[in-house]
Amino acid sequence: MHFKMEYSCICGACTVTSNHKPMAVYCCHCSDCQKSSGTDYQVNARFKPGQLKINAPEGGLRNFRKEESLAERVYCRTCQVRVYVDRWGQDGSLALQVVPVGLLTGGRED
């Protein structure tokens, strides 16, 4: 059985695809998700490292990470939409990746 999920920012310059089902789909109520979504929560899909394929033009992404945070948010430079988040472990290794479910543009299971 083949599975594929596709996500994109508003302008379509940056896309994320995965042939894996997310580890979890959940509502995050942290203050960063509230501020970035403008609502009480954001619905996210959580993936293991290496399960996402990020496609963006050269220089098309910008990163933001608060000093004390283990989360590094990655945005499209053109439309400013958050495309995904890298969540780092205490040891400095990539622990998981998160994509806002609102970016979902298509998916299928064959």
Image: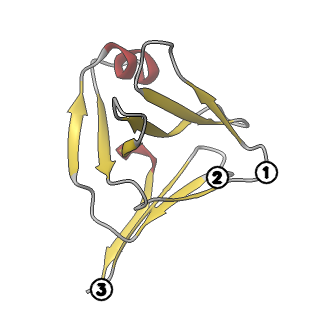
Specify the farthest residue to the right.
58
Between the residue at mark 1 and the residue at mark 2, the CA separation in whole angstroms equals 14 Å
Q: Secondary structure at mark 2?
A: loop
**Quarter of the image holding residue 59?**
top right
Residue depicted at 39% across the width and 17% down the height: 32
Disc number lying in front (1 or 3) = 1
Specify the farthest residue to the front.
91
Disc number lying in front (1 or 2) = 1
Mark 3 and mark 1 in contact (Cβ < 8 Å)?
Answer: no
Tell me residue 58's x, y (percent).
79, 51
Of residue 102 and residue 65, the one placed in the foreground of this image is: 65
Can you say which quadrant of the picture contains the N terminus? bottom left
**Quarter of the image holding residue 81?**
top right
Q: Amino acid at mark 2?
A: Gly
Please give the residue where the numbered disc 1 appears in the rendered image. 58
Q: Residues within 10 Å of mark 1 (few under 14, many from 20)?
A: few
Residue depicted at 20% across the width and 49% down the height: 24
Q: Amino acid at mark 3?
A: Asp
Tell me residue 83's x, y (percent).
53, 42
Seen in the picture, residue 31 relative to 60 is either above or below; the reply is above
Q: Secondary structure at mark 1?
A: loop
Q: Amino acid at mark 1?
A: Glu
Image side of residue 49 versus residue 27, left or right: right
Of residue 89 and residue 21, the one placed in the foreground of this image is: 89
Residue depicted at 69% across the width and 51% down the height: 13
Image side of residue 72 versus residue 93, left or right: right
Please give the residue where the numbered disc 3 appears in the rendered image. 110
Mark 1 and mark 2 lie on one chain; the one further toward the N terminus is 2
Between the residue at mark 2 and the residue at mark 3, the CA separation in whole angstroms equals 25 Å
Picture disc at residue 12: 2
